[in-house]
Image: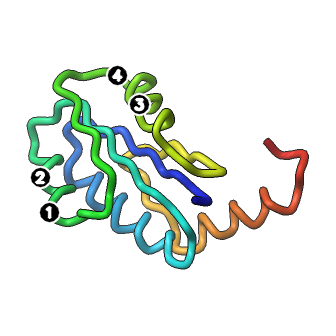
Amino acid sequence: MKLSIIIVNYNVEHFLEQCLISVRKASKNINVEIYVVDNNSIDGSVNMVKNKFPDVKLIENKFNAGFSKANNQAIKISDSKYILLLNPDTVVEENTFKKIIDFVDQDDKIG
């Protein structure tokens, strides 16, 4: 796997959906795994991910674990060369991941 994208969510279903749509587009032709760690949302976020993004690896916390702990939950099980922590209110351009990976791959001093 080349890139693990980790998104921590708490009650921002609409933003999360837009984020995942953009992540899906930006992930074309890149070997990625996408994690959503949900911190016990009550707004339908979990069902939206399950129904619209079945390829996303969903971690459903039964309490609000907080941002850092939630990220660490996914980092521990990710299997990629690179990890991207992405906020759920972020929309990425279609070539964002390719540009970043190409840049980092060209310089072995970047870690």
Type of amino acid at the residue the image marks with label 1 = Asn
Query: Residue 25, how many percent across, how many down?
Result: 44, 74
Marks 2 & 1, CB-CB < 8 Å contact: yes
Read off the residue under disc 3.
Answer: 73
Which sits earlier in the primary sequence, circle 4 or circle 3? 4
Residue 66's disc is 4
**Residue in front for this viewpoint, 43 or 73:** 73
Read off the residue under disc 2.
Answer: 47
User: Which element carries disc 1, helix, strand or loop?
Assistant: helix
Q: Residue furthest bottom?
A: 29
Q: Quadrant of residue 23?
A: bottom left
The residue that appears at 46% across and 57% down in the rendered structure is 33
Residue 51's disc is 1
Which sits earlier in the primary sequence, circle 3 or circle 1? 1
98 vs 87, left or right, is: right
The residue that appears at 47% across and 46% down in the rendered structure is 86
The residue that appears at 90% across and 45% down in the rendered structure is 109
User: Which element carries disc 4, helix, strand or loop?
Assistant: loop
Type of amino acid at the residue the image marks with label 3 = Gln
Q: CA distance from mark 2 to mark 3?
A: 20 Å
* Quarter in which the C terminus is drawn: top right
**Residue in front for this viewpoint, 46 or 89:** 46
User: Which element carries disc 3, helix, strand or loop?
Assistant: helix
Marks 2 & 3, CB-CB < 8 Å contact: no
* Quarter in which the N terminus is drawn: bottom right
